[in-house]
Image (cartoon, rainbow, N blue to C red):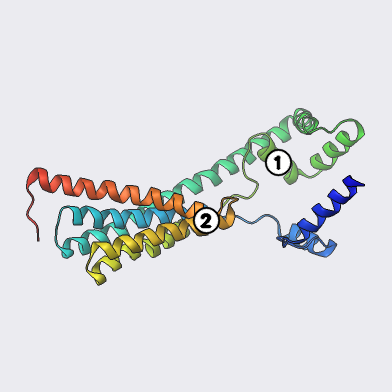
Amino acid sequence: MRSAESLAEGQRQLMQYALEHSHTEQAIRARLERGPQSNYLRDWIYGGIDGTVTTFAVVAAVAGADLSAVVVLVLGFANLLADGFAMAASNYIGTKAERDDYDRVLGIERKHIALEPEGEREEIRQIFAGKGFSGDDLERIVTVITSDRALWEKTMAVEEYGLSPTPRSPTFAALSTFAAFIACGLVPLLTYLSAGGLAACVLAAGATFFGVGAIKSRWSPVAWWRSGLETFLIGMSAAAVAFAVGFGLRALFNLPTH
């Protein structure tokens, strides 16, 4: 009786939470037909944090050296555009390398299947045996997979080489990084130039760091405030280092101020 009551209570608690998607037969079929979608969250987060850090570091370093706002304007926008483009280009090349590696593995498996089909069938057999299948069930799985050449190649790429079944677009990855870099990087720069003070820039950059971290928690089990605080501390630490370097160089070389 107590076990049944506990089960019922657990079900009631689960009902309090909204499910992420429907589990009707039609909804499941439609979702699976669409297939898994490529995720560019990493590119947005990476570009947003780095864009904020880059421009805030420039502002902090120049403020630490007590140089003029013109220097902030020139260095800030130069770094914003140049670093944003460099990051986007690097991400494009890196993502393209991942796709090229996926295509290379598919080519290898295509050749192996053509030249040594029995050996490749045995690989499929051992892969799914390792997942707990055996007997007739295992043989049916091997037959189904190896009867479709494209499915066979893709299964080997994913299971044997550990590659993602949904390679990402290098163009979308680069554009995501660049857009986030520019959008977030403009915040500390424009705040400093318009408000005319480091304090306003610090508040704006800190809010941006926290906001990016809080948004990131949407795709994480970590609480939004904890994710935001973590990103805030990392970003502000980088800016503190830049400010200290600028201040130290000004004191060391007795640089002129504005």
For badge 2, the amino acid type reads Lys
Badges 1 and 2: C-beta atoms under 8 Å apart?
no
Q: Is residue 225 visible?
A: yes
Q: Name the mark nearer the viewer: 1 or 2.
A: 2
In the picture of the structure, the residue carrying the numbered disc 1 is 153
Q: Which residue sits furthest front?
A: 2
Quarter of the image that includes the C terminus: bottom left
Give the image location of residue 137, x and y in percent: 89, 36
Sort mark 1 into few (<14), some (14-19) or many (20+) by Cα contacts within 10 Å: many
Q: Name the residue under label 2.
A: 216
Spot the residue most to the bottom: 194
In percent of width and height, residue 31 lies at 74, 60
Q: Can residue 173 be seen in this view?
A: no
Of residues 230 and 8, the one nearer the viewer is 8
Which quadrant of the view contains residue 28? bottom right
In this rendering, is residue 254 above or below 77?
A: above
* Residue at horizontal 39 percent and vertical 49 percent from the top: 233
Q: Helix, strand or loop at disc 1? A: helix
Q: What x and y, as percent, mark residue 135? A: 90, 30
